[in-house]
Image (spheres, rainbow, N blue to C red):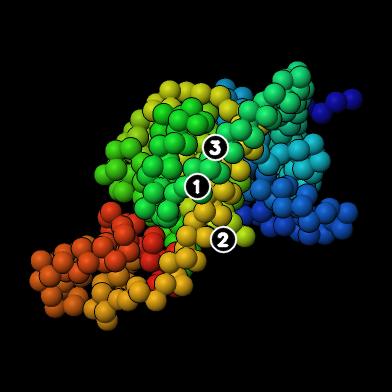
Amino acid sequence: MTHAYEEVTFQEFALFIKIYSKQLEENINIYLNLEPSISESDRKRTTLLLDSFILLLTNIDIEDINDADRGYLDKWLQSQLSIIDVRSFNLFQLIFEKSLITFMIQQKHSRMNGILMYLLSIFTYLVQSYNKYEEEHKTKSKLHESLELKNLLLLDQLNKLLIRCSGYQDLAYILKKCEEYFQYKRCVFYAYVPWSNQFYGVIGAELSKVQSMKGQLTEHHLVFGSKKPIYLKDPKNYVKEEHIKLFNLSSIIFIPIIHDDQLFGWLTFDQLGEEFDCTKDQLQLLEQVGKRLGLFLSRKGEKVENSSELHLTEREAMILGLLAEGYDNKKIGSLLFLSEHTVRDYVSSLMTKLKAKNRTQVVASAFRIGLLK
C-alpha cells in the first residue's frame, strides 16, 4: 500500500530552503564534521558545493520563479565545474539529504514526503547533467593533448610578457594582452583589500564604470567569496541587476589572483554582452593565469617595499588612510580642515609617488607595498 503525498513545486521548495536555511546549515556542519572518513580536501570541496547550492536557493527571487527549475540547476552546476568531482558530488548529495531529513523529522513537517520526493528529482537531474558533462569531456579527450600543448604555449607567452613588464603600472597593458591571448573581448581587474575586506574596480575598458565598482565583501558574494574560478553562463541571481545592466553582461568568468594564499583580487573575462560557453579545461587554464599574475604582483610588491626612496609625509599618510576609507576630497578636507584644492594636490602627490593613475590604484598600490595594513 502506498501513501499519497502532495506534490511540491520548485517555487515551494526554494521558499522552504529560504525559510529554514539556518537550521539546514547547522545540520550540514554537524554531518560534515562528524564523518571521519572525509578527507580534508573532500571536505573543502563538499563545503563549497553545499554553501553555493544553499546560496542559489536562498538568493532566488521567489516571485520570478516558474516551474522550469532545470535552468537554475544547470546554471549552478556550470558555476561549480572547477570544484566538482565524483566524490565531492556524491558527498554533497548525501550530506544535504541527511541534513534535510534530520530537520524534517525533528520538526515533524507535514509535507516531508513531498519535499523529499522533489529533492530526489533535483538530485536525479543533477546526476544526469553531471554525467553528460563528464561524457562530453571524455569524447574530447582525443583532443586533450593538442589542447594541453596549446595552453602551455599560451601560458609561456604570458610568462614572457610578465618578465618584460616592470610593475603594477603595466597591468592595463597585461590585461589587454590577456584579452588577445585567451580571446575575450573584455578583461577587468578588481583589487582586494583584506584589512577592510573590500574590493575595488581598478583597470578595464570603460574605466569610469569599472572604478565605480566597489563594496564590502559578505558571505553572499559567491563570485568574490570564492578562491576558485567561477563561470556563469547567466549571471542573474549571482551579480546585481544594476551591474549586469551597467556592463551589459551576459556570460562571465571570475578568476582569483592568488599567490601563497594571499588574494590580490580578481580578473573577469567576458564577451561584451555575448553569451558563451566555457569548459573545465578553459577554467583550469585561466586559473593558471590568476596564479601567474599573483606571483607577478607579489614580486613587484616586494621590490617596491624594500625601496628606501618612497617616503610619505605625515599629512600624505593621513590622506592615504582616508582615501582607503572611501572618503572624497571634500569630506577629507572637512575632516583635516583643508581646502578641497589642497587635498587634490596631496592626492596628486600620492599618485606620483605610487606611480598610480587614479585614487583606486593609489589605495591598491599602498596596500601591496605595506603602506597600509
Q: Residues within 10 Å of mark 2 (few under 14, many from 20)?
A: few
Tell me which residue sits at (42%, 72%) in the image. Answer: 307
In primary-sequence order, the first of circles 1 and 3 is: 3
Q: Which x, y percent locates residue 139? A: 75, 18
Q: Amino acid at mark 2?
A: Gln
Tell me which residue sits at (71%, 34%) in the image. Answer: 119
Q: Quadrant of the N terminus?
A: top right
Answer with left or right where residue 13 lies relative to residue 140: left
Q: Quadrant of the C terminus?
A: bottom left
**Hey, which quadrant is residue 6 in on the image?**
top right
Q: Residues within 10 Å of mark 3 (few under 14, many from 20)?
A: some
* Residue bearing mark 3: 157
Query: At numbered mark 2, what does the secondary structure look like: helix, strand or loop?
Result: strand
Q: 345 or 334: which is nearer to us?
A: 345
Answer with left or right where residue 202 lies relative to residue 113: left
Is residue 245 visible in the rendered image? The answer is yes
Rendered view: 354 above or below 179 = below
Label drawn at residue 262: 2
Q: Amino acid at mark 1?
A: Leu
Q: 141 or 46: which is nearer to us?
A: 141
* Residue bearing mark 1: 162
Rendered view: 36 above or below 189 = below
Q: Residues within 10 Å of mark 1 (few under 14, many from 20)?
A: some
User: Between tags 2 and 3, which lies in front?
Assistant: 3
Answer with left or right where residue 272 lies relative to residue 351: right
- The residues tagged by marks 2 and 3 sit, at their Cα atoms, a distance apart of 24 Å
